[in-house]
Image: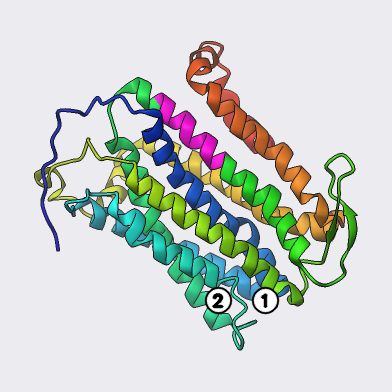
Amino acid sequence: MRKDIIPSRHDEYHKLTRGERIGYGMGDFAQNLVFGTIGGFLALHMLTVNTISTATAGFIFLFVRIVNVFWDPMVGTYIDRRSSSAGKYRPWLLRAGIPLVILSALLFAPIPGVRGSVPFAFIIYLALDLVYSVVNIPYGSLNASLTRDPESIDKLTSTRMMLANSANLLVYTLFPMFVQIASPKDRSLKDTGFFGFELNMGNYTDPSANYAWFGVYSIYMVLGAAALFFCYKFTKERVVATAEQTANVKTTDLFLELKNNRPLVILGLFFMLAFTFMFFMNTVNGFFNQFVVGHSEWMGAVGLVASIPGIVFPIFWAQTQEVFWQKRVLPSFPCLVYCG
């Protein structure tokens, strides 16, 4: 039931506490843990363990991405025009967050009779992606509703990036290691790349590893659900548009804005390219180490090297951003990302 609530604005410049910053950042942690694992390893699981053909999997991913182009503006409009006693954006962390973790787990679930089932994989992945938008879009809006205080915003950005990259560490460093440790076939003592550290690992691209994938992901699912609840519990909306301001919001507003706002188009293209390269790298990494390098046991070491800068650098971002701008280094970062 819709409730038009005009929030109190006396604390719009509230100084966020460390607990509030961590609370909000746990949302990034949860989404990277739950959906980041899907983005990084679902294709590998789908093509090897679930034995779905490459062409079919590619079609599923492409179709869902096309649906997202139209679905996301609709979700944003729907959420902007509604509110509740718990807030405009916060409630969706739980309303859609619980279905999100359940649907994501189903993609790895060793359910009898659905291995290799294209309709099952298609329906679950489509539903998962639609639900993810209902979590991610209000979560992004929640960031702007916490405070207008510039210092708090800088610290919040550093905190959320540190937690997001901590989740990436769990996903791209530990997840493939844990799954290989739990995989039953072709087990042997292998060098992990951590300075001679060896572990007894199996082949996680064999269909017999389906229970290993589901078991490890179930732990990540529980951690992600707990992090979403933590985010809901320790955030408070303070800067929210009134019912009058959002009454005329329409789905077509985004497309009209893109037509008339060239800087927004440029920014959108930048993010499109950045995320395309990032998701391409994350998805291909598992295939590359397994079938080209031939050492999937090294994925943990490679992921660790890639994750550490993303965890450490945001800690000092608030103190160093002015230096980067003054030295005109920051505008060159996109080039470094693309080259990397």
Image marks 2 and 1: residues in contact by CB distance under 8 Å: yes
Magenta span has 28?
no
Q: Which mark is residue 121?
A: 2
Disc 2 residue type (three-letter): Ala
Q: Please state the horizontal and vertical placement of residue 265, each as a whole percent of the image.
A: 40, 40
Res 45 → quadrant: bottom right
What residue is pinned by disc 1? Answer: 50
Whether residue 41 is visible to the viewer of this picture, yes or no, is: yes
Residue in the picture at 60% in, 33% down? 311
Q: Is residue 185 positioned above or below 328 on the image?
A: below
Q: Which mark is residue 156?
A: none
Q: Please state the horizontal and vertical placement of residue 271, each as a whole percent of the image.
A: 49, 41
Q: Is residue 29 left or right of residue 91?
A: right
- Specify start and end residues of the magenta stretch as a single range: 154-165
Residue at the bottom extreme of this rendering: 113
Q: Please state the horizontal and vertical placement of residue 32, each as a whole percent of the image.
A: 53, 50
Report the predominant secondary structure element of the magenta stretch: helix
Whether residue 258 is visible to the viewer of this picture, yes or no, is: no
